[in-house]
Structure formats: C-alpha cells, structure tokens
Image (cartoon, rainbow, N blue to C red):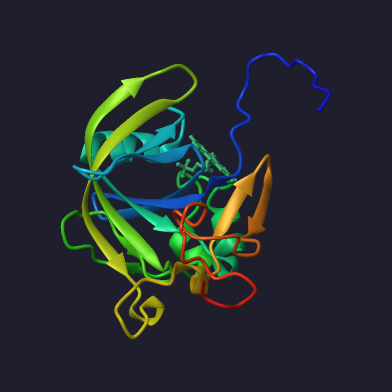
Amino acid sequence: MEKELWKPGNMLYPLPVVMVACRENGKNNIVTVAWTGTVCTNPPMLSISLRPERYSYGMIERTGEFTVNLTTKALARACDYCGVKSGRDVDKFADTGLTALEASHVQAPIIGEAPVNLECKVREIIKLGSHDMFLADIAGVHISRELLNEQGKLELSKAEPVVYSHGEYYGLGELLGSFGYSVRKEQKRNGRKK
Ligand SMILES: Cc1cc2nc3c(=O)[nH]c(=O)nc-3n(C[C@H](O)[C@H](O)[C@H](O)COP(=O)(O)O)c2cc1C
C-alpha cells in the first residue's frame, strides 16, 4: 500500500463511544466520551480523558465518581446530543428522556436504557495537555438480563453496540471469528466439525 506521512495526530479508530454520567449536589449530567479505554484487567480499571472546560470535568474531579454507560444503535442520537450540549445549559437526562437509576457503589447515576453500566471511582487524574486522563477503578458492573443467554453468557452483540470512527458512528459489522479462532483446531469448516 502506498502511504502519505501525516503530522502526529489521533487516528486510532474505531473506538467505543460511551455516555459518562455524573452527579454533584443532586444534579445529574451526561458527557459523551470517545477517549476511553480498558487499562487493566485485575484490578479492573478504565480511563476516560476529558477537557478541563467540560462541565462534567469539575463534577467528576470533585466527587471522584462517574459511571460509564455503553451505547447502542437505539441510543446513538442521545449519545450524540450529550456530546454537543453542555450540562451548564441543559438537563441532558430530561432532554433525551434517558432514565437516571441509582448505582450500587457510587452516587453517580447509571443510565437505565444502556445495556451495560460500569460504576467507577477515580484513582488518579493525570494532566496531559488538551485532555486530562481520569484513571478509575471499576467498582461494579450492571448487565441487562435480556442480554444473557440460557447459560448466563453475555451476548453483547444483541444490544447492537455502536463504535465511533473518525467522526462517524457505526454499528458492528459481521462476526469474523471469536477469541483464538485462528489457532483452534476443531474450528468448524464448511459447517462441519473436523
Ligand atoms: C462522539 C463524541 C465523542 C466525544 N469525546 C470526548 C472525549 O473523549 N473527551 C471530551 O472531553 N469530550 C468529548 N466530546 C465532547 C463532549 O462530549 C462535549 O463537549 C459535551 O458537550 C460536554 O458536556 P458537559 O459540558 O456537560 O460536560 C465528545 C463528543 C462527541 C460527540
């Protein structure tokens, strides 16, 4: 492939895009975040990066808590809205019709319509530049029962998750394989087990 050399920039796509919810003095807010990632399995940890000028930045900095709510095709429009309007000016729960439910380990609300909610406690705020990274421990996870199969396994694809790629939202494409399928000997070929 012939390549062009571009100046340094963010081009790590696709990414998850999540709705981060927070609460301070009884006021709820939601901020859309694409600069997020899993950073550790044990202890379970994730990060979100926020610009200090976001209204939610101060709320999360002061309370040390937030929830990460996964987005789906049905939530894509609300997710975008929460990423273009500020909690300084609007009530995003009221405007989107999303439901703020009580979490179990943090004061921040979880979004009822999201299929998966992660309760997070901030461990450290790392000043980086345009964005600061909030490193957080995951204190609890809520999973929609309707996504569990008869064996209790989570079938996340049923929720129709959304990804964010270079300014655009997409659903997931076709299933290409599962973890380790490239080396699995008993992999079904032509529909038959070897
Ligand atoms: C798809 C998308 C992804 C975004 N990702 C981030 C992000 O990772 N970090 C950030 O600080 N802002 C991000 N934003 C912008 C904020 O969500 C936006 O400025 C929001 O209005 C801030 O809300 P607040 O002022 O209520 O906190 C994103 C917006 C969109 C639409």
Question: Where is 187 relative to 24, above or below?
Answer: below
Report the residue that reaches farthest toward the front. Answer: 194
Q: Quadrant of residue 170?
A: bottom right
In the picture provided, is 179 more to the left or to the right than 78? left
Residue 178 vs residue 169, the one in the foreground: 178
Residue at the (65%, 61%) spot, across then down: 173
- Horizontal and vertical percent for residue 21? 37, 52
- Horizontal and vertical percent for residue 12? 59, 33
- Horizontal and vertical percent for residue 1? 81, 28
Residue at the (24%, 35%) spot, across then down: 62
Q: Quadrant of residue 177?
A: bottom right
Count of numbered tags: 0
In the picture provided, is 136 more to the left or to the right than 5? left
Residue 162 vs residue 79, the one in the foreground: 162
Q: Quadrant of residue 43?
A: top left
In the picture provided, is 125 more to the left or to the right than 164? left
Question: Where is 6 relative to 11, above or below?
Answer: above
